[in-house]
Image (cartoon, rainbow, N blue to C red):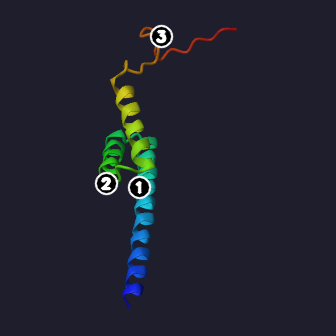
Amino acid sequence: MRYVFVVFFLLFSFGFAGCSKEKAAEMYNTAQFEELQNNQEHALKLYQEIIEKYPGSEYAKKAGERISQLKQKSSGPPQGTGHPKRAGKIIYRG
């Protein structure tokens, strides 16, 4: 009887380990979708949550890289339309 309990416990434990990897992957994919929707604030929160909940996972590493990239991107020079006097003008050359 003890053997059955130990086997059941191990299978149960491994089942949860797989679920956490799937959950981390799901959260990472959701964060990427949020980025595509220009919702960087929510994406950053999701990436941070992945790092906190699944610190040793491959998705935590990826999330940390994305946080660094997004913060670097947001602290860079503002994205403009080019030369301020030419912004919005269409120049035809023929």
* Amino acid under disc 1: Ala
Query: Which comes before the other along the chain, label 2 or label 3?
Result: 2
Residue 26: x percent and y percent?
A: 44, 57
Query: Which comes before the other along the chain, label 3 or label 1?
Result: 1
Q: Residue 86 has which mark?
A: 3
Circle 1/circle 2 CB separation < 8 Å: yes
Q: Secondary structure at mark 2?
A: helix
10 Å neighbourhood of mark 2: few (<14), some, or many (≥20)?
few
For the C terminus, give its image quadrant: top right
Residue 14: x percent and y percent?
A: 43, 69
Q: Secondary structure at mark 1?
A: helix
Residue behind mark 1: 24
| In front: label 3 or label 1 | 1
Query: Which comes before the other along the chain, label 1 or label 2?
Result: 1
User: Is residue 23 shown above or below 7?
Assistant: above
Q: Residue 53 has which mark?
A: 2
